Amino acid sequence: MLLTRFNLKNVNAGIVSVPDESLFALPEKVLQFGTGVLLRGLPDYFIDKANRQGIFNGRIVVVKSTDGGDSAAFDKQDGLYTLCMRGLVNGQSVEQNVISSAISRVLSAAKEWGTILQCAHNPDLTIVISNTTEVGIELVNEDIRNHPPVSFPGKLLSFLYERYKAFDGSANSGMVIVPTELISDNGRKLESIVLELAHLNGLEENFIEWLELNNHFCNSLVDRIVPGKPAAAIKTTLEAQLGYQDDLLTMSEVYSLWAIEGDDHIKEVLSFAPTDKGIVITDDITLFKELKLRLLNGTHTLSCGVAFLAGFTTVKQAMNDAVLSNFIKELMLHEIAMAIPYPIPAKDAEEFSLKVLDRYSNPSIEHQWISITLNYTSKLKMRVVQVLQRYAELYKAVPEKLAIGFAAWLLFMKSVKMEGNVYLGELNGNTYPIKDEMAGYFFNHWQNLSPENLVKTVLSDASLWDVDLTLIPGFAEKVTEKLQEIMEQGMMAVVGKQ
């Protein structure tokens, strides 16, 4: 049995939460750019939850911009999909299955752009959400009168221009736009690109004034691991439990956060927010950004080389090992949390850290360490360098585990050969890909420098860090010491001594 609106009556409501038939009559209030699993697993989940509580009472029309993807599956399943949430909360296992009815329809930008523009005439439609990947929010100098424009900002500008004309530029026809792409200040960046593109297209000043004054671009931060469609064996098992086939079945962790910068007007428009404590609307989301960037992402980055070189494939495997899990916990709580470069109460940092440790230990999420090593070098710069500097400034000491993390990164970046355009490292006789824009740089350095000189050369390279990290007293010496110990004794021996 395929999951469809007609077949909902045959679904066991004791196993999965089934939407009421009345929800299908709700008006479209949200335009969403993107069909991806993060949107389904977070914003769409929140909106569906609000609809079930009779609070928001609006559905989502989705714009599919790419040629690939699963638009046909949405059509076959009447926009329905199952979200299977699995995780640990305070160490206790939690499982929830929900059939979401938030999506009303999916429209192809390539084939149905005229229909998408017609949505701009809908007075109920007041919100835009997007997740077009980090590269989606980029300026492309193009004619927005193309059907459709190429870029996401071009499509958004074209839509907003259509809305401006449809409502004669009335002040109350403006929209609240909330991008969820994982870049800093995503709302402000999107707004600046849309405005520049409006000028490049020679659009009238009255429209540009309406765009600036009556539309609200909100910075936002999303935080939920949504791996998406599970492996075939797991999907088969889940479908057997649920009693139906779902080609859009989506897995996610239980934890969720959507932090949005906004005022009372934003809260009024995003009226679904009160339904879940995972939605936070505040005038400044920096605290949430710093907690996530340093404690979740920073710990991941500093641990990935350590765990991978120790022979662990997934995060949960490492968390099941007493030595590795203790290393990760100590790194997070007693080094990173103590030196976040933003005034965060110690209690908030500790509470967030404990939630992160629960998330790392989630037995239902297969998070590969090798995936976390993507763009390893730039992640260290963005997530860790300021923490290192702050730690040295506050405590006049070198953070031991952070130094091990840097040493592990350097050893991970030691490639032995190149196949195609990919540099390969070697571990226990097997090769692994080094997907980092600096891979060639490290290949050359490892070929020509001793470990000690390598550490000094790399840490002093301000083109990598914007600063000279050898100026931090004792740091280069500690990283050199740990690197040599790892190469001589093995990763687990070094981590086990901590």
Image (tube, rainbow, N blue to C red):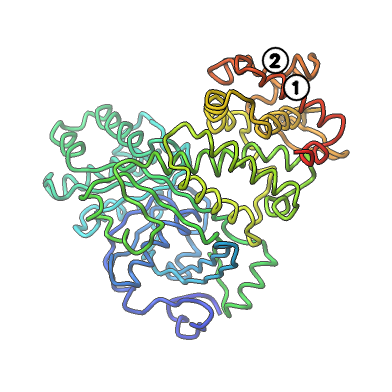
Check the image and report above or below for 130 versus 435: below
Q: Which mark is residue 456?
A: 2
Q: Secondary structure at mark 1?
A: helix
75 or 253: nearer the eye?
A: 253
Q: Residue at x 27, y 59 (%)?
A: 271
- First in sequence: mark 1 vs mark 2: 2
Q: Residue at x 66, y 71 (%)?
A: 236
Q: Disc 1 to disc 2, how far (Cα)? A: 8 Å
297 or 291: nearer the eye?
A: 291
Q: Residues within 10 Å of mark 2 (few under 14, many from 20)?
A: some
Q: Which mark is residue 227?
A: none
Q: Residue at x 26, y 66 (%)?
A: 27
451 or 244: nearer the eye?
A: 451
Asked whether the beta carbons under mark 1 and mark 2 sit within 8 Å of each other, the answer is yes
State the count of labels.
2
Left or right: 257, with 159 as reference point: right
Q: Quadrant of residue 214?
A: top left
Q: Secondary structure at mark 2?
A: helix
Q: Quadrant location of the C terminus? A: top right
Which residue is disc 1 drawn over? 480
Q: Amino acid at mark 1?
A: Thr
Left or right: 386, with 174 as reference point: right
User: Residue 207 placed where, x, y %?
Assistant: 17, 37
Q: Amino acid at mark 2?
A: Lys
User: Residue 177 placed where, x, y %?
Assistant: 30, 46
User: Residue 344 placed where, x, y %?
Assistant: 43, 39
Q: Quadrant of residue 230?
A: bottom right
Q: Residues within 10 Å of mark 1 (few under 14, many from 20)?
A: many
User: Residue 197 placed where, x, y %?
Assistant: 30, 31
Check the image and report above or below for 387 versus 13: above
Q: Residue at x 64, y 36 (%)?
A: 302
Left or right: 117, with 103 as reference point: left
